[in-house]
Amino acid sequence: MPTLMTPMDPHADPLRAADQVALHWLGDSGEAELYTFDGLEDQVRRAAAVFRAAGVGEGDAVLVFLPAMPEAVIATLACERLRARVVIGSEAEDGAVTQSTVAGPGATAALRELIRAERPQVVVTADAVLLNGRLQSPKAAVDRALRGPGRAGGTGTEGTGTDGTVGSVLVVQRNAYPVGWTPGRDRWWHQALAGSVSRRFRTPMASVTSSSSKSR
């Protein structure tokens, strides 16, 4: 399973060095990523700007359907800046996306019901991730959930059964995996953040909702 060192609050220590490592990630396939405090803060500010432009404000929900990876932390911290609600789209006890969450029995129905209940305006997911030695596509699971029951094809926008609340799906590109695409709704995470304006502002912590905790 991926290993993710939870970052410290960049504002907790005013004497911290800008180049101090705040986040260290080790992936299943051996890849590693390091984020300094300044680098992490920049990504969080950019993500917050993207969320805000998509209409996310205080109390609004953002669904994070990702395994333990840096973008999941960035999206969560960005929501905290906006006082938005973070919904962890997972059935796992530790809040991480697992193989059974993506491709297991009932996974699509569970994700669809979570979207109906939480009404997120933005979903953050990935093209494909390596889980237990197998390549799985969280984006495909999101597309199936947004299409609604009984619809094998389509763009993913019609008859979703989610009241059309999801206006934006941000896709982290990890494995250059071919995925379905809905123009006007789907955007690559890296392109969206590259085009956003990084602004400094601080807000209190927001609430985090986990589908696994709600079901217990």
Image: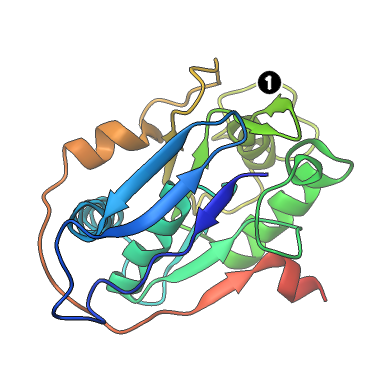
**Left or right: 16 with respect to 145?**
left
Point out the residue furthest to the right here: 105
Give the camera-side residue of 106 and 127: 127
The residue under the point 81% across, 43% down is 100
Residue labelled with disc 1? 153
Relative horizontal placement of residue 6, taking residue 95 as reference (left or right): left
**Going 80% across and 32% down the picture, which residue do you hit?**
150
Front residue (pair 116, 3): 3
Dividing the picture into quarters, in which one does residue 37 lie? bottom left
Residue 64 seen from this side: no
Please determine whether, in this image, residue 209 is positioned above or below residue 199: below
The quarter of the rendered structure image containing the N terminus is: top right
Residue sitting nearer the eye, 61 or 196? 196
Q: Secondary structure at mark 1?
A: loop
Q: Answer left or right for 59 relative to 132.
A: left
Q: Position of residue 129 (x, y in %)?
A: 60, 32
Residue 119: where, in percent of width, then height?
55, 62
Mark yes or no: residue 132 visible: yes
Name the residue type under label 1. Gly
Q: Position of residue 49 (x, y in %)?
A: 21, 55
Which x, y percent locates residue 84? Answer: 39, 71
User: Would you identify the image quadrant in which residue 170 lies?
Assistant: top left
Picture layout, residue 127 above or below residue 195: above
48 up-or-down from 106: above or below: below
